[in-house]
Amino acid sequence: QKEVEQDPGPLSVPEGAIVSLNCTYSNSAFQYFMWYRQYSRKGPELLMYTYSSGNKEDGRFTAQVDKSSKYISLFIRDSQPSDSATYLCAMSLLMKTSYDKVIFGPGTSLSVIP
Amino acid sequence: EPEVTQTPSHQVTQMGQEVILRCVPISNHLYFYWYRQILGQKVEFLVSFYNNEISEKSEIFDDQFSVERPDGSNFTLKIRSTKLEDSAMYFCASSGGYNEQFFGPGTRLTVL
């Protein structure tokens, strides 16, 4: 079983649609959950991070974590063509120190069509 | 807004040659990382670095790889004898804490 799994897509939606991106993971010790956006041939850009279960909202983006199901989601409301990118879920253990590695999912490619 | 920078953006080298990839982390960050991404594959952890020493390394980070913080601003990744399979995007990241890692734009390494 892979440590972090994502549907690779591609996912194509019309402008203005609500987008739902999902990840599952196998290691129940993960405590810290992140979503990164990556444009083609660019570095991952941190979008959102959450600690443990729950929801977090930032503008058009909402991140959800369900630790009991080992399932995390990112919702994008009113999607824009500029949201077209690959979305990477990522997670790490919560260590006493802050240098724990981030484990990435393979990414979901999203296209928002004008 | 402060950001992580990396040079060069693209490095082409011959198999067996040494390469050094350079990174300038965000200035007040204390934790530094290298990741790589082979074309079409996921981002993979290589090494983390804190307090002038390696904190953790993956199985990818073998004896051909080394990292250094030669001064107060730069963080480097050296590959001693490059192989074809080292061709990838290499990302530097830094963190001020709480696992929020900020990534640079990457160096595309092509080994011929």
Image: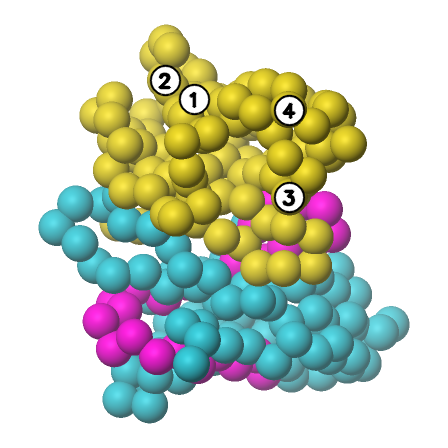
Q: Secondary structure at mark 1?
A: strand
Q: Chain of mark 2?
A: B
Give the quarter of the figure containing the C terminus of chain A.
bottom right
Residue topped by disc 3: B85
Task: State if disc 3 and disc 4 touch (CB < 8 Å).
Answer: no
Q: Among all residues in the image, which is located at the extreme front?
A: B16
- Check residue B16 in the rendering and tell me which mark sits there, or answer none: 4
Q: Is residue B25 visible?
A: no
Asked whether the residues under marks 4 and 3 belong to the same chain, the reply is yes
The boundaries of the magenta stretch are A20-44
Cα separation between marks 1 and 3:
23 Å
Residue A110 vs residue B9, the one in the foreground:
B9
Q: Which quarter of the figure has residue B61?
A: top left
Task: State if disc 4 and disc 2 touch (CB < 8 Å).
Answer: no
**Residue drawn 27% across the image and 32% down it:** B54
Residue A72 image point, x, y percent: 42, 79
Cα separation between marks 2 and 4:
24 Å
Residue topped by disc 2: B69
**Residue drawn 61% across the image and 80% down it:** A7
Task: State if disc 2 and disc 3 touch (CB < 8 Å).
Answer: no
